[in-house]
Amino acid sequence: MFESIDPRSPTPLYEQIAARVRVAVAAGDLAAGDALPSVRALARDLRVNPATVVQAYRDLAADGFVEMRHGQGTFVLEVASYLRDEERASRALELVRELLTEAARLGIGAEELARAFQAETGAEIRE
């Protein structure tokens, strides 16, 4: 879940960590009651300051994704379906932006992308 954390990204590490958890919850990879890695363990694995992980977990708690239990750990909460849907839509938009940025860098236009999308998925292109 945390393999794509990029210390060179302009996005702060704590935001990247929180985003990965949100996506995992939205995708159903994490369910209510699941424990997140301890602050120390995750900080060690990602080679970041523990305060970075604490900030990510606090943001997730403030958004209603997790509950931090003193001395016990951090656990995923039951997330309302509209929050999961919003997170999935947000991630879809990010993916499209990444695709368009990379396509523009390579000189690939929207029509060519649409044809590739159709070829890959079999989806009809509507104009």
Image (cartoon, rainbow, N blue to C red):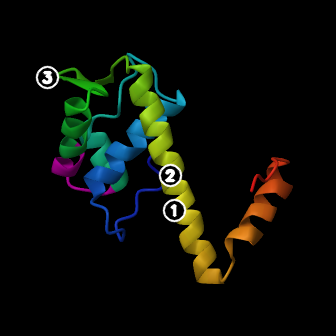
**Residue sitting nearer the eye, 72 or 26:** 26
Disc 3 packing (10 Å; few <14; some 14–19; many ≥20) = few
Magenta-colored span: 47-53
What percent of the width, then of the height, locates residue 52? Answer: 21, 51
Quarter of the view holding residue 100: bottom right
Q: Secondary structure at mark 3?
A: loop
**Above or below, 106 relative to 97:** below
Indicate which label's residue lies in the foreground, 2 or 3: 2
Q: Is residue 14 left or right of residue 81?
A: left
Q: Which mark is residue 97?
A: 1
Q: Residue at x 31, y 62 (%)?
A: 11
SS label for mark 2: helix
Residue holding disc 3: 70
Mark 2 sits on what residue? 93
Mark 2 to mark 1: distance in Å? 6 Å
> Does residue 81 appear anywhere in the picture?
yes
Quadrant occupied by the C terminus: bottom right
Q: Give the percent coordinates (x, y) of residue 61.
A: 22, 30
Q: Using the image, determine if residue 97 lies above or below residue 75.
A: below
Label 1, label 3: how far apart the Cα atoms are: 39 Å
Residue 1 in sight here: no
Residue 101 at x, y = what percent?
A: 54, 72
Q: Of the residues shown, which amino acid type is indicated by label 2?
A: Leu
| Front-most of residues 82 and 57 | 82
Q: Is residue 60 left or right of residue 3?
A: left
Residues under numbered marks 2 and 1 in contact, where contact means CB atoms less than 8 Å apart:
yes
The amino acid marked with disc number 1 is Arg
Residue at position x 19%, y 32% from top?
A: 62
